[in-house]
Amino acid sequence: MSVLPAVLNDAAAVAAATGLAYTGAVVAVAAASVLSRSAERRRDARETLMILMRRRGAR
């Protein structure tokens, strides 16, 4: 039997989990940029969000 299907299935599961974690981080930072009471924290959260959402191909 080939091991390749099991490896591909595990890789897909890891990729999905990573994508969900990244999305969760972006949502948390976006919420912080809107809901923080301090203007400095909102500004820092917006800067972090810009870093997270930067397009990788636009260098």
Image (spheres, rainbow, N blue to C red):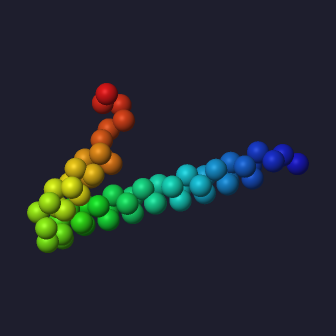
State the residue lying farthest toward the left: 39
Indicate the position of residue 34 as horizontal and vertical percent values.
Answer: 17, 65
| Residue drawn where x is 14% and y is 60% of the image | 40
Relative to 24, 17 lies left or right? right
Indicate the position of residue 57 as horizontal and vertical percent values.
Answer: 35, 31
Indicate the position of residue 47 as horizontal and vertical percent values.
Answer: 22, 50
State the residue lying farthest toward the right: 1
- Counting labels gives 0
| Residue drawn where x is 32% and y is 38% of the image | 55
In-front residue for pair 12/38: 38
| Residue drawn where x is 29% and y is 61% of the image | 29
Indicate the position of residue 23 as horizontal and vertical percent values.
Answer: 39, 58
Relative to 12, 58 lies left or right? left
Quadrant, the C terminus: top left
State the residue lying farthest toward the top: 59
| Residue drawn where x is 53% and y is 59% of the image | 17
Relative to 2, 31 lies left or right? left
